[in-house]
Image (tube, grey):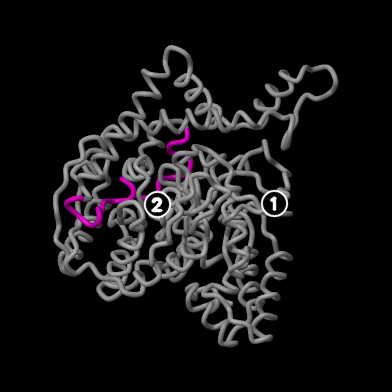
């Protein structure tokens, strides 16, 4: 089992295709790993053991019939509990959807099944994807496999923890303000936020519709690229879906190079609040890029300093609108329906019981920002700042091919450390939010451990809209250099497991 769970997704798929391993063997190994360690980690909200084994058997039968298998056929995956999955509970980490069984698959779920990827189950997350630590889950926090007293990032901490604990070689996350990249950074894994509209949002429960984006999570750049190609592409069921070919991300990951590329470093992505060890590893990464043949260009993007403020007006405003559908009358939790309460009272009682503190906080903030007399002053102004941020990115990408930065200002903080300080929690997304506001693509990959706490540090790579292949080209080159120079930055065995 130990040998199987340490394989990359690409290696696993190759061994299944050749017959060296069966998909059932691989799935059973990962299910056994989940059973052995997830009681400590709490990465999964639901493990679909029978469904996963049935998918694995179907892959083995295909191979026995001589049918050609796809590049990820039989590879297990952990799916964030925000994507509807027919016949499998989908809670979005909230009590308001506890026990809800969707009657249909999200487009991402459909594409995973069509590619014969084996879905092991649904992973823990901050309720409705609102948070940076997975502490806002109604079902309890997830631990970071590097140190179970630390957070695994958020909102997709369950997916990142499942990867770091070797419970799955692949995972799916969603990124509204950094919820793929920030968990990847603090768990030493790879996470990609594709260009907005590159991956369908159909069947992905909405938080902030103009910011939400599903994307791949993995332990290597190539594995992330293989998963990216499976889930990306135009979907007529999503009105924001981009009708363009998927960039050649796998080819880029197989041919990583930064030779002759111009790499931007933004001066706003450092300073007060950044951990010394994070800046040290980032500066070393920049030097490495120079050694690999890149030209480093200093950039000034002044509007980035306003990104956090703009985000925490736009995202709550859209959340206030999207979550209005959870009224206790149509699906999910219903409280107070005993014949004595009006429909309005049932809705109020249901929301009081079903939504957690952070969701309520953002709904109230968003409703206030959208209210008469305040709309232009708050939401309207935030949208103007969003335009300025996009313009800063456009100017920057006239000078450089990609931008690099730390993914997060600090390494993983202790569970409970920021629970009573929302502003401190929000600062975890300082480096990731501008990309969501502009809609372009970004990746986080490991760039070593911070010397003061021996916890992972993430390097963020940002590319222009629909130039996602540049992320993989640069990411693969950096990853290969790290392996050659210092050994692979990923853990062989999670220290706390």
Query: What secondary structure is the magenta-colored segment mainly?
Result: loop
Examine the rendered structure and indicate whether residue 16 appears above or below residue 110: below
Q: Position of residue 109 (x, y in %)?
A: 61, 57
Examine the rendered structure and indicate whether residue 126 appears above or below residue 406: above
Mark 2 crowd level (few <14, some 14–19, many ≥20, 10 Å Cα): many
Q: Is residue 407 magenta?
A: yes
Residue 64 lies in what quarter of the image?
A: bottom right
Residue shown at 40% from the left, 24% from the top: 379
Residue shown at 22% from the left, 67% from the top: 258
Label of residue 104 in the image: 1
Sooner in the amino-acid sequence: mark 2 or mark 1: 1
What residue occupies the far top of the structure in this picture? 373
Q: Is residue 82 visible?
A: no
Q: Is residue 319 left or right of residue 425?
A: right
Mark 1 crowd level (few <14, some 14–19, many ≥20, 10 Å Cα): some
Q: Secondary structure at mark 1?
A: loop
Label of residue 195 in the image: 2
Examine the rendered structure and indicate whether residue 488 appears above or below residue 389: below
Please provide the residue range marked out in magenta.
398-419
Q: Is residue 255 magenta?
A: no
Q: How far separated are the C-alphas under marks 2 and 1?
A: 25 Å
Q: Position of residue 417 (x, y in %)?
A: 43, 39
Q: Is residue 188 visible?
A: yes
Q: Secondary structure at mark 2?
A: loop
Q: Position of residue 289 (x, y in %)?
A: 20, 64
Frontmost residue, 89 versus 274: 89
């Amino acid at each position: 089992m130990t040998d199987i769970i340490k394989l990359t997704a690409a290696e696993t798929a190759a061994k299944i295709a050749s017959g060296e391993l069966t998909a059932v063997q691989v799935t059973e190994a990962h299910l056994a790993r989940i059973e052995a360690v997830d009681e400590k980690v709490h990465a999964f909200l639901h493990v679909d053991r029978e469904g996963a084994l049935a998918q694995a058997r179907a892959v083995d039968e295909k191979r026995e019939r001589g049918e050609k298998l796809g590049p990820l056929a039989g590879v297990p995956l952990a799916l964030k509990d925000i994507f509807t999955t027919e016949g499998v509970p989908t809670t979005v980490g909230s009590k308001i959807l506890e026990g809800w069984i969707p009657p249909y698959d999200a487009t991402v779920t459909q594409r995973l099944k069509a590619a014969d990827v084996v879905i092991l189950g649904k992973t823990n997350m901050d309720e409705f994807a609102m948070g940076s630590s997975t502490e806002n889950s109604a079902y309890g926090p997830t631990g970071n496999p590097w140190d179970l007293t630390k957070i695994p990032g958020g909102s997709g901490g369950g997916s990142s923890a499942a990867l770091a604990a070797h419970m799955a070689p692949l995972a799916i996350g969603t990124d509204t303000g950094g919820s793929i990249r920030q968990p990847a950074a603090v768990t030493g894994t790879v996470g990609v936020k594709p260009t907005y509209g590159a991956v369908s949002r159909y069947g992905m429960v909405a938080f902030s519709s103009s910011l939400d984006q599903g994307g791949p999570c993995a332990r290597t750049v190539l594995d992330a690229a293989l998963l990216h190609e499976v889930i990306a592409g135009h979907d007529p069921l999503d009105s924001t879906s981009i009708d363009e070919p998927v960039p050649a991300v796998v080819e880029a990951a197989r041919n990583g190079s930064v030779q002759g590329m111009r790499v931007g470093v933004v001066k706003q992505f450092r300073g007060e609040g950044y951990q010394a060890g994070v800046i040290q590893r980032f500066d070393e990464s920049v030097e490495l890029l120079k050694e690999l043949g890149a030209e480093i260009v200093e950039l000034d993007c002044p509007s980035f300093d306003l990104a956090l403020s703009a985000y925490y007006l736009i995202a709550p405003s859209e959340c206030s609108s999207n979550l209005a559908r959870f009224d206790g009358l149509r699906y999910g939790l219903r409280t107070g329906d005993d014949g004595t309460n009006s429909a309005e009272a049932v809705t109020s009682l249901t929301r009081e019981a079903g939504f957690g503190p952070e969701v309520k906080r953002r709904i109230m903030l968003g409703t206030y920002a959208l209210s008469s007399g305040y709309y232009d002053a708050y939401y309207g102004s935030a949208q103007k700042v969003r335009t300025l941020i996009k313009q800063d990115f456009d100017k920057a990408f006239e000078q450089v091919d990609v931008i690099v930065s730390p993914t997060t200002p600090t390494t993983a903080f202790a569970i409970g450390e920021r629970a009573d300080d929302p502003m401190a929690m929000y600062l975890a997304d300082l480096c990731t939010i501008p990309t969501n506001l502009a809609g372009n693509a970004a990746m986080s990959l490991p760039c070593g451990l911070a010397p003061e706490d021996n916890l992972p540090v993430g390097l963020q790579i940002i590319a222009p809209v629909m130039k996602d292949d540049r992320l993989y080209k640069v990411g693969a080159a950096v990853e290969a250099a790290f392996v050659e120079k210092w050994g692979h930055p990923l853990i062989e065995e999670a220290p706390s497991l």
